[in-house]
Amino acid sequence: MRKSSLYVTLLVFFLAFVGGPTREAEGKTYFAYISDSPSSSVVYWVAKEAGIFKKHGLEVELIFINGSTRGIQSLISGDVPFTSAVGTAVINGRLAGGDIAIINSLTNTLPYYIFGKPEIKSPEDLKGRSAAMHIPGTAADFALRLALKGVGLSLKDIKGVTVGGGPARVAAVVTGQLDFTVGPEGEKIRGEKGGLKVIIDMAKLNIPFQFTCTVATRRMIRENPDMTRRAVRAVAEAVHYYKTNKEGTIGVMQKYTRGQSRDFLAEVYEAQKQLLVEDTYPTMEGLRNTLEIQAALDPKAAKAKAEDFVELRFVEELKRTGFIHQLYGRR
């Protein structure tokens, strides 16, 4: 069975059990983040630890769910009202029948690198090598496919091994179990410190791509628009906190990464600061680019439109009301 077909089958299985409203207990709002990498999840950590969620009337409990695919599954099954994700997982979930939508965005490009053992001298040398991969539907999976395509290769030309999240993928290569992997800035820095080298720098290509974003079900949006609005505002304010409070942000990173060195986290901070979207508006061009590639795997993608995967009224409200200008002291 093809991986894309397996994904759809599993997701439809989850859909069959969608019944009641999103689960909440004792007034808490559950919010899933899908990566333990500071490059991907720090804004949500900041929103929690800096009291920004609470400022906007949300008593949030953050839950770690490894990978966008699983995050979307938990969202659809009603376990959480919000999850972070990447655009590929949202597209797959929506095409499989999930009534979900992106409500804001943090990163609108694909800041990924292919890196591995020093003996790999060129992108063409990846052929026949073993790769530490993430699960299908994640940004890391998409980035690897896109990078291989750019050098005339495909997954058939390598030996892919599903390992999981970024830290685990890097460890698998640093320890010599596998030859190369894919990851964002934080994982690239960690890999370089372990003796690995960059083979393909996708960040330089500045490819429009819906990377980290926040997703909710359309039912949630319809039945509780105020909570959705407050979540969008809190995340936008957390982006501002990140960009204007380096020490506070690095402190939050250290807590969630179990005491990673400050020097390492400072490098991650500077790289991510340039990538975060101030107005938290999703990239429609990035979604269109992804749909074009997904069309080769799923015929439904060829008929879909980028607008099918977003609910923009909350981010548009941020602009219309001057919320973003007020955060950054602009008129």
Image: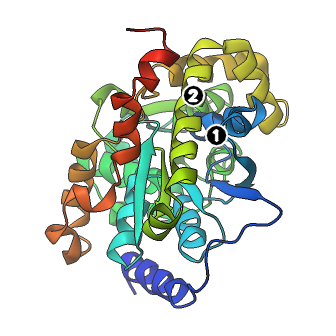
- Looking at the picture, how far across and down is residue 33, in whole percent? 63, 51
Relative height, residue 132 to residue 49 (above, below): below
The numbered mark at residue 44 is 1
Query: Nearer the viewer's eye, disc 1 or disc 2?
Result: 2
Q: Residue at x 62, y 21 (%)?
A: 241
Q: Residue at x 37, y 76 (%)?
A: 4
Marks 1/2 in contact by CB < 8 Å: the verdict is no
Q: Nearer the viewer, residue 291 or 157?
A: 291
Left or right? Give the position of 298 relative to 211: left
Q: Residue 257, can we see it?
A: no
- The amino acid sitting under disc 1 is Tyr
Residue at disc 1, secondary structure: helix
Query: Considering only order in the chain, which callout, 2 or 1, is on the residue closer to the N terminus?
Result: 1
In the picture, the quarter occupied by the C terminus is top left
The numbered mark at residue 273 is none
Q: Residue at x 56, y 17 (%)?
A: 243
